[in-house]
């Protein structure tokens, strides 16, 4: 390999390493930013709760539970999710946009397709859940993308299935 080819290979390797280094440091910053914005929207303690997002063939299931079973925390989760379910059914996804940004994956499709979504709120042990169902495969895909972004953005405060 001549010197020119060696330099080129070195530049490729360095560029790749720098790109990966940039990716790993950006994620914690994004998660911190999302947590800070989330504290202004969600009335419960993000540090003492877990968001669970389960993709289903017909939509998805979003759950939020209190990690320590605290009655006040559980009540705040339930009140918040009940309000969100009502807003979402009406196409109002303002709160997730405030937390995750207006360019959030799947958000536009959910806003414009809200009339084709069935959204059902219910209480569960130590929290609450929202079940999203749709007959439209594109809307289900948008919901799954929306779930994925929330799992990524919430970091240790969320789980996805």
Image: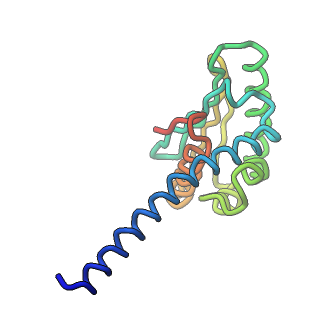
61 or 37, which lies in front? 37
Horizontal and vertical percent position of residue 75: 77, 20
139 or 156, which lies in front? 156
User: Which quadrant of the structure image shows residue 13?
Assistant: bottom left
User: Which quadrant of the structure image shows residue 127?
Assistant: top right
Horizontal and vertical percent position of residue 25: 55, 52
Query: Please, is residue 73 above or below residue 36 in the view?
Result: above
Q: Is residue 21 left or right of residue 45?
A: left
Q: Is residue 26 left or right of residue 84?
A: left
Query: Please, is residue 76 above or below residue 92 in the view?
Result: above
* Picture mark count: 0
Residue, far left:
1
Q: Residue at x 46, y 64 (%)?
A: 18
Horizontal and vertical percent position of residue 19: 46, 64
Q: Residue at x 62, y 16 (%)?
A: 125
Quadrant where the N terminus is found in the figure: bottom left
Query: Please, is residue 115 above or below residue 6 in the view?
Result: above
Q: Residue at x 37, y 75 (%)?
A: 11
Horizontal and vertical percent position of residue 14: 39, 68
Q: How is the image coloured?
A: rainbow
Residue, far front:
3
User: Which quadrant of the structure image shows residue 41?
Assistant: top right
């Amino acid at each position: 390999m001549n010197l020119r080819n060696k330099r080129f290979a070195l530049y490729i390797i360095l560029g790749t390493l720098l790109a990966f280094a940039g990716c790993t440091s950006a994620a914690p910053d994004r998660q911190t930013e999302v947590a800070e914005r989330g504290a202004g929207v969600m009335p419960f303690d993000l540090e003492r709760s877990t968001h669970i997002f389960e993709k289903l063939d017909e939509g998805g299931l979003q759950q939020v539970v209190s990690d320590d079973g605290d009655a006040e925390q559980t009540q705040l989760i339930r009140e918040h999710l009940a309000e969100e379910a009502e807003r979402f059914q009406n196409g109002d996804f303002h709160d997730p946009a405030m937390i995750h940004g207006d360019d959030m994956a799947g958000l536009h499709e959910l806003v414009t397709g809200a009339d084709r979504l069935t959204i059902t709120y219910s209480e569960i042990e130590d929290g609450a859940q929202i079940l999203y169902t749709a007959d439209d495969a594109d809307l289900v895909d948008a919901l799954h993308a929306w779930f994925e972004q929330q799992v990524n953005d919430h970091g240790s405060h969320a789980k996805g299935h």
